Image (tube, rainbow, N blue to C red):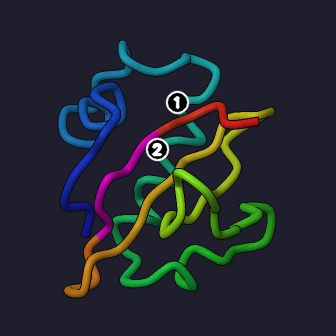
């Protein structure tokens, strides 16, 4: 279950299917990733072929990332209850 978002556009896409806050060429991929994240209870649940799941470091220590497109990554972490929190969309490279 996704509990909290940092990115307002992702929150609107997830809750209201409002695509105005994200890049239009990423909408289909983001919908798929958010559905998988919603069903996940730990980072390993997001380890699907092609997503390139990896842990982050430095200011994003504790977060994991999956590939959206190009340099764009969906980042997230899980709380003790198994809910995804602080879900964000960043270009971190």
**Residue 48: quadrant of the picture:** bottom right
Q: In the rendered structure, does residue 86 fall within the stretch colored magenta?
A: yes
Q: Position of residue 61 (x, y in %)?
A: 53, 64
Residue at the image position 40 percent from the left and 77 percent from the top: 40
Residue denoted by label 2: 31
Report the magenta stretch's main SS. strand
Q: In the rendered structure, does residue 47 fall within the stretch colored magenta?
A: no
How many numbered callouts?
2
Residue 38 drawn above or below residue 81: above
Q: Position of residue 52 (x, y in %)?
A: 77, 64
Q: Is residue 52 left or right of residue 7?
A: right
Q: Which residues are magenta?
A: 84-88
Q: Is residue 89 left or right of residue 52?
A: left
Instruction: Assess whether mark 1 and mark 2 are in contact (beta carbons under 8 angstroms).
Output: yes
Q: Secondary structure at mark 2?
A: helix
Residue denoted by label 1: 27
**Residue 7: quadrant of the picture:** top left
Q: Secondary structure at mark 1?
A: helix
Q: Is residue 75 left or right of residue 12?
A: right
Residue 89 drawn above or below residue 9: below
Assign the N terminus to one quadrant of the image: bottom left
Q: Position of residue 36 (x, y in %)?
A: 47, 66
Q: Residue furthest top?
A: 20
Assign the C terminus to one quadrant of the image: top right
Residue at the image position 32 percent from the left and 53 percent from the top: 86
Residue at the image position 30 percent from the left and 40 percent from the top: 6
Residue density around tag 2, few if under 14, some if 14–19, many if 20 or more, within 10 Å: some
**Residue 91: quadrant of the picture:** top right
Residue 24 drawn above or below residue 59: above
């Amino acid at each position: 279950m996704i509990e909290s978002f940092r990115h307002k556009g992702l929150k609107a896409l997830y809750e209201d299917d409002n695509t105005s806050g994200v890049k239009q060429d990423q909408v289909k991929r983001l919908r798929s990733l958010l559905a998988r994240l919603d069903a996940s209870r730990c980072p390993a649940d997001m380890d699907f072929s092609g997503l390139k799941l990896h842990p982050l470091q430095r200011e994003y220590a504790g977060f994991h990332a999956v590939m959206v497109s190009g340099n764009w990554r969906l980042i997230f972490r899980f709380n003790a209850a198994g809910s995804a929190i602080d879900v964000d969309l960043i270009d971190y490279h």
